[in-house]
Amino acid sequence: KCSYVDTIQPSEAVEEIIEEVPEPPVKPVELPEVRQGGSKKIEFSEKVYPNMPARESHKKEPPLPKSKKLKQNKDDKDMNFSIEDKDPVWLKDKGDHFFKRHDYNSAMNAYTKSIKNDPDFLMCYLNRGTTCMKMHNFEGALLDFDDIEKKIDAESEEEKKDPFYARMMSRVLVKR
């Protein structure tokens, strides 16, 4: 078999051009000297437990309080419930979860329980009022919005300047 590449004969002109191309000068490359070998002794701290890092704290840290109004009463009759069931922030988040899924009765219960544990938690009043509106309980919504106004009016003038209270009042007035 004869291929197309085999049939091409290099011409003399191409050979002359190839011979005329000068080769670039080659500079000798200077290599650095070989480094001296050495060894370092590294000491590791002893592991107390094989599954934990040696510097890991073995002491249990106290849990952070979820709310400043959260009371931990050991004589409480609801001792069989976990601390989350009494944490107003956790209950508000639980109510928000139910509200997003249109389970308004469960949301109402969670917000009410949160307000019972922390009566100064204004966001729960606002969310419970909104839930009342969704359930067409407009009287309950007005009562919650009135409670928010009363609690904000009871605050000092210094605290009323906080943008949180201004946003809260604007939300209350819009929902009315």
Image: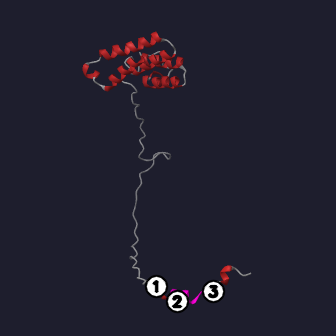
Residue drawn at 40 percent across, 61 percent down: 41
Amino acid found under the numbered disc labelled 1: Glu
Q: Position of residue 158 (x, y in %)?
A: 25, 22
Q: Is residue 143 above or below residue 123?
A: above
Residue 16 colored in magenta in the image: yes
Q: Quadrant of residue 4?
A: bottom right
Q: State the residue in front, 158 or 15.
A: 15
- Residue 14 shown left or right of residue 9 in the figure: left
Q: Residue at x 67, y 83 (%)?
A: 6
Read off the residue under disc 3.
9
Closer to viewer: mark 1 or mark 2 = 2
Residue picked out by circle 1: 23
Q: Which residues are magenta?
A: 10-19
Picture quadrant of residue 102 = top right
- The residue at which mark 2 appears reads as 16
CA separation, marks 3 and 1?
25 Å
